[in-house]
């Protein structure tokens, strides 16, 4: 890693993963990949929309060349701060991944500090199931996800609703405290 800044961003992202994604079991498949150090963290220096898309394709190419890595988090600390702009970028990113031949190879998941589900009030604690310290795209190997699903004993379709219920039970203040805590992490 090239800079203290990037190391801090990764440390904050890892803290969020441990506290929220793994700690609250929002993703039942994250813990083994995290513990086995099979997540690649790329802190993008992009500021422009087009540069973010270039980084996305570069990250897909990185995963192609590094098969032991299961998944990648592409983190944008200096871009896509506006949630609507982020959603526009996500739409273009998904089309770009398809055009580049990655449909069925990688699935994109998205996280953002201001994430708000369509039709949801922005103060709904359920939004925190997808709120993260920084805008980020999560590249997930489809084959790895299919393998994980073979061993998952519960109904995978219930995960989002279960997560939303838990977030609402914990409340906005508690969910925000997880983000605040992760942002205090230092490299």
Image (tube, helix red, strand yellow):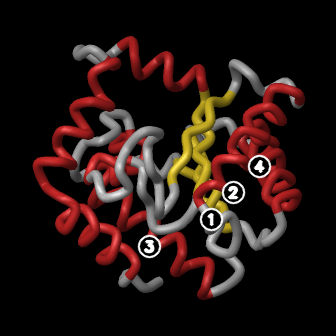
- Quote the CA–CA distance across marks 3 and 1: 20 Å
The residue lying at 37 percent from left, 34 percent from top is 29
The residue pinned by badge 3 equals 12
Q: What label sits on residue 17 in the rendered view? A: none
Assign a secondary structure to mark 4.
helix
Whether the residues at callouts 4 and 2 have beta carbons within 8 Å, the answer is no
Q: Is 160 on the left or on the right of 70, as rendered?
A: left
Where does the image place residue 179, in percent across and percent down from the top left?
34, 69
Whether the residues at callouts 2 and 3 have beta carbons within 8 Å, the answer is no
Q: Residues within 10 Å of mark 1 (few under 14, many from 20)?
A: few
Whether the residues at callouts 3 and 1 have beta carbons within 8 Å, the answer is no
Assign a secondary structure to mark 2.
helix
The residue pinned by badge 4 equals 56
- Quote the CA–CA distance across marks 3 and 4: 21 Å
User: Depth-wise, is mark 1 or mark 4 nearer the camera?
Assistant: 1
- Quote the CA–CA distance across marks 1 and 4: 18 Å
The residue pinned by badge 2 equals 85
- Quote the CA–CA distance across marks 2 and 3: 23 Å
Q: Earlier in the sequence, mark 1 or mark 4?
A: 4
- Quote the CA–CA distance across marks 2 and 1: 5 Å
Q: What label sits on residue 82 in the rendered view? A: 1
């Amino acid at each position: 890693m090239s800079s203290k800044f990037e190391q801090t961003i990764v440390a904050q992202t890892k803290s969020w993963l441990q506290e929220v994604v793994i700690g609250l079991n929002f993703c039942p498949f994250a813990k083994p990949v995290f513990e086995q150090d099979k997540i690649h963290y790329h802190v993008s220096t992009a500021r422009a929309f087009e540069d973010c898309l270039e980084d996305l394709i570069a990250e897909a190419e990185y995963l192609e060349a590094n098969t032991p890595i299961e998944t990648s988090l592409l983190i944008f600390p200096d871009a896509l701060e506006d949630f609507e702009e982020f959603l526009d970028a996500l739409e273009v990113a998904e089309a770009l991944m398809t055009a580049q031949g990655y449909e069925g190879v990688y699935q994109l998941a998205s996280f953002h500090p201001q994430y708000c589900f369509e039709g949801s009030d922005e103060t709904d604690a359920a939004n925190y199931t997808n709120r993260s310290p920084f805008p980020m795209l999560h590249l997930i190997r489809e084959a790895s996800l299919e393998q994980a699903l073979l061993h998952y004993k519960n109904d995978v379709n219930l995960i989002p609703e279960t997560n939303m219920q838990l977030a609402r039970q914990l409340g906005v203040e508690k969910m925000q405290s997880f983000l605040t805590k992760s942002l205090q992490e230092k490299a």
